[in-house]
Image: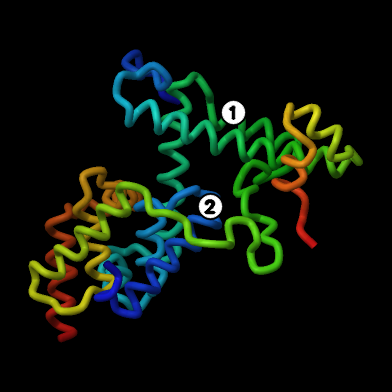
Amino acid sequence: MFERFTTAARGAVIGAQAHARTAGHAEIGAADLLAGVLDDATAIPARVLADLGVTVAEGVAATEEVFDAEDATALSALGIDLDAVRRQAEQTFGPGALDRRRRQRPGLFGRRGGAGHLPFDAEAKSALELSLRAAVAEGHRHLGAEHVFLGLLATEQATALRVLRRLGVSADAAALERQVLARLAAAA
Amino acid sequence: MASAPDTVDGTTSPDPAVGLRAVAALRRLVEQLEDLQVANARGQGWSWADIATALGVSKQAVHKKHAPHT
């Protein structure tokens, strides 16, 4: 499926993998993929967000916050207060004690999980399929980071949109898609 | 947080998406706590064997998972 990917799109996927590892995720999720797409400040997705007043750093940070917030919600359903657990850990072990403990000690060649790739979760897979569909629909012969971004905007779970809402972006998927396509047309 | 009366019960929700998400979040939390506690125990001079006993796993398992590779 990756044969039509441009170097930038491949870079975004590799970046997504790195984000997932850093955050200690077992799979590459849509939020990780979004972070990978936004890493390149010169690419269309980051520039569309810049137009909306969001920097790359803010965008990438928000992908992780959304993930944490959704974990907190899921745990609260079990009667576990993640914030309380974190507070207690920090009281005993210092600030950030609970955060990103995983993958903090990558051995030589990133031993831990360094071998092989992390799998994509269902939403990330769906986003990649939708990115291909978006490229085909627009008659583009290449599949760039901008198409991956479009795929992320189109998933049923809408994680990317939730990340953007968190950043105060109120534009809906269709409006964002128009901006991406406008920039793409301008660049052609 | 989430004191709403309609809060779903994550473990027993009939919707697999909700239940599985809760399990995944719990697993991540467990892993984080394990890393934190094992590092603390090592810092206080605990042996791998003692840590393994406390965790209820084999010494090999805990060593493989947490020992820094050299």
Crowding near pointer 1: few (<14 within 10 Å), some, many (20+)? few
Q: Nearer the viewer, mark 1 or mark 2?
A: 2
User: Where's residue A74, x and y in %?
Assistant: 42, 30
**Which residue shows up at 47% across the image and 28% down it?**
A75
Question: Closest to the observer: A179 or A53?
Answer: A179
In the rendered view, does A161 fall on the left or right side of A37? left
Residue A97: give x, y in percent of width and height: 68, 43
Q: Amino acid at mark 2?
A: Ala
Which residue is painted at 48% across and 35% down in the image? B25
Q: Amino acid at mark 1?
A: Ala
Q: Is residue A60 left or right of residue A176?
A: right
Q: Nearer the viewer, residue B59 or B54?
A: B59
Q: CA distance from mark 1 to mark 2?
A: 20 Å
Q: Which mark is residue A84?
A: 1
Classify the position of the C terminus of chain A by image quarter.
bottom left
Q: Residue B50 got which mark?
A: none
Residue A124 image point, x, y percent: 32, 53
Percent x, y of residue A118: 47, 56
State which quarter of the image contains the N terminus of chain A: bottom left
Total marks drawn? 2
Name, please, the residue furthest toward the top. B5
Residue contact between numbered discs 1 and 2, judged by CB atoms under 8 Å: no
In this figure, which residue is indicated by the disc labeled 2?
Answer: A23
Q: Nearer the viewer, residue A49 or A7?
A: A7
Lower sequence index among marks 1 and 2: 2
